[in-house]
Image: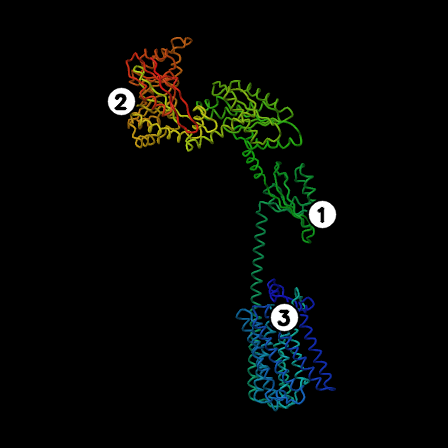
Amino acid sequence: MRPAGCAVRRFVSGVPPADNFEVGRGGRFEHALLGALAAALGAAATGAGLGFVAPVLGNALVGAGGTVAGVAAGAGFVVRARADAVRRFGWLAVGVFAVAGTAWSTVAAVQVAVPGRAPVLAAHPNGDLGALVAAPFGVLGLLVLTRRDGNRQSRLLAGLDAAIAACALATLAYGVGRPAGVGAVGTLHAIAAVLLGTAAIAAIARCRLEGDIPFLALFLIGAGVIVCELGDLFSLRPLALGEWSPRHPSYLLAVAGRLVLGLAVLSRTAERADLVQLRRREYIAVLTPVLPVLAVGSLLIAAAVMRVSLRPATLILLGVLGILLLLAWLAARLDQLLLSRTLEHRVVERTLALRTHAKWFRSLVQNSSDIITIVDPSGVIRYQTPSATRVLGYDPNAMVGQRFVSLVAPADVHRLEAILLDAVLRPRSTHTIEFAMRHAAGHWRETETVITSLVDDHDIRGLVLNTRDVSERKELERQLTRQAFSDPLTGLANRALFANRVEHALSERSRQPGEVAVLFLDLDGFKGVNDAQGHAVGDHLLTLVADRLRRCVRPSDTVARLGGDEFAILVVGPQAEAHGVDVAERVQRALAEPFLLSGREVTLAASIGIAVTDDGTETVDQLLRNADLAMYRAKSSRKGTYVRFRTEMHDALLARVQTETDLRHALSRRELVLHYQPTVNLRTGQVVGVEALIRWYHPTRGLIQPMDFIGMAEETGLVESIGAWAIRECCRQGARWQRYAQPGGVFHVAVNVSGRQLHPRLPDIVRTALTETGMPPGALVIEVTENILVKRSEEAIAVLRQLKSFGVRVAIDDFGTGYSSLSYLARFPVDVLKIDKSFVEQITDRNSGTEGTELVRTILHLGRALRLGTVAEGIETREQYAALLAMSCDYGQGYLFSRPLPAEGIDTLFGGTLVAGLPEQRVVYDATTHLSASRETGRWSVGPARLRA
């Protein structure tokens, strides 16, 4: 069976269901039920006909037909109850009603049909007691099935209809009276009939247009209940007189009622009800409560004709019925009046709403920034909104009768006419098009128009064009495009547009073979101009450079500013590499000509890297990266030149990246070690301290010199953690080496500090290292270069003074190679000057004459004058040593005394091999000392030290 909820969905949709029987599309149970009902009907009809010939056989057939009809109807209602959980009790109650009445009459029919048995129930003075038992179930079932939530007014009207029906039925029952021979139970039968009739009539009256149960089903249930109850009433007299049999008309009437109940189970809902069915329902629902009243009227007429006096109770019932009818009439009048006033109020509200909407629409049309135009299928204007005056400066009335394309730019006419034709051929279609329209002042406005085809609309019969002025939006889009894809300072393409052009050129190679060359330019000397003369002059210089670059390329080439003083040029074509070289040479010649800035001539150069596609698999990022690598190679080799990218440059980049990655783990893997180069007292030959020099022993690449990774550590910021480790390690070793100090002195350990390390946290790092290791603060020497002190003077002074405050000494490394200003020597808290190796080498260099010697002598005099210690670096020959000693240099370092040694080598150095002696003895450490290392153990060994006199 179909779910009973299917009707609910149709009612929710707003369209009442139609009444229909759809047994053919039902399930197996519907076919079985229909067959049972047909069999019951056939048996009852046959039995009634054969009763005149064979009474026993006729009674049996009619009784069997009644039994089958009642059981089939009850089973049908049980199945409906399983499918409708909301009204399950209602369906079950009606089913009990059908089965209970059938049970009594079936037993009575069996008694009559079986010969020799006394028909006890068929001759009972109290009538069909089964009908009395079934009556409450019938009433409850009808009430549950028609239960519906409604407003108070609808409930009152429904209750009034039920009261009128009940009063009319009671008048009929009482007026007819109790049949002769019927016991007092006959009054109960009359009350049951009144209640069932009232419930049935109320159910039919309440299901006019909507409900969860089809109207036909409820109508058949109500009709079946009424027919069954009529059969019960008509059977009272024959039962009392013993004249009842299954072929009696009262029993046939009851069988007919059960057949009608069975048909109610089979009723289904079609898709939708038409107007005729709706009107038919309305008539049935309205007239059904009137039928008992008409019957009462007929009874009164008959009584008057027959001059039968009415009993007082009948008169009372008639009076009550009259009052109820009057109340119903008043309720109907009030309902009609209320409905009339409600409709009038709604009409007034609707009229006001329509007027308000009309005003809104008129205001919207008159003040809208969009132009709404209606044209006929031939493109002639039939209507145009007043907003055309504000947007285009035309009088809309004057435009009526003209062709719409006369307002459109000639370049857009053909495209617009094609779209208008397509809109005419395809009603209800929508098109969007942009074109320029002529303003009354003579200029053009960019517009966007939405064309809606309403040629099939009887009121429009044309095209509706909604036109909006988008000139400002288009201009803003162009500005945004320029900002997104061009450099605002120079007007050249920016990085995004340049990358897009390169990507397009690479994709075109699959269709048109050729080369793609990218030139990466970096201006040499621009930073000095920008810093010296200011950013405004620097920006002006960049615009002049951009103008010269434009003159160096073909129209098909692309020049872009990537940012700062970096430019790029894209060259495409069969000979892109050769042309790229020509462009690079033209750029160098163009930039070599002086620029006039604020009355001064400025000369620039450009380091240029050239990258060209090779195997066709290159991407945009790869080409730019390769050109950038080549540019850096050009800048490092000689500024103002160009270099073509080679694969080994990328290999070097990968090696650098790998080195950087390994350096990040070098500390944790303990691959970094410190070597120490002794500092010797030149007069006594005694070792008074050491300078820590870092070394990196890579597990696969072996020893990596500081020059190959210190710069990288500076760039990546790793130098801070490496430097902190070096300071802690120096303090740890220096604390242990204090036993080698001269009496009353300390054994100095010097450590270099880079610019990145010279920050406010450095004093705390040094103080913590000294505290944890127990090294005397005066034994630690912090070495910095001149350039660091000058570039970061104020910050350096603050940091170095903090270090001096707890006893740490400060030395200037490579003195003489930087600024060497006397003013900063007075400002900075310096203790030691270290003479650079390059000056020491000039002492014995015959080609330099006496300049090198005098320069060293000057530095030594300066140190003595400022009471600063002096250390000569890079002493490698006896001649250099003798010359420095003659100039009264205090201390020295160099391979003449010792190469840098691991910590174990310093311990071996002081293991009894140094002998104190007179100044002329010159005790030094032999540079030929054997030094070896084991990669497996990481331990170092130093061979026997030998002395030189």
User: Which residue is more in the foreground, 185 or 770?
Assistant: 770
Q: In the picture shown, does residue 97 fall above or below 370? A: below
Q: Residues within 10 Å of mark 2 (few under 14, many from 20)?
A: few
Q: In the picture shown, does residue 197 fall above or below 492? A: below
Quadrant placement of the C terminus: top left
SS class, disc 1: helix
Residue 425 is tagged as 1
Q: In the picture shown, does residue 348 fall above or below 608? A: below
Q: Residues within 10 Å of mark 3 (few under 14, many from 20)?
A: many
> Label 2, on which residue?
745
- Of callouts 2 and 3, which one flags the residue occurring earlier in the amino acid sequence? 3
Q: Amino acid at mark 1?
A: Leu
Work out how far the residue at label 1 is from the one at label 3, CA to CA, in angstroms: 49 Å
Mark 1 against mark 3, which lies toward the viewer? 3
User: Which residue is more in the foreground, 115 or 418?
Assistant: 115
Q: How many marks?
A: 3
SS class, disc 3: helix
SS class, disc 2: loop
> Label 3, on which residue?
215
Work out how far the residue at label 1 is from the one at label 2, CA to CA, in angstroms: 109 Å
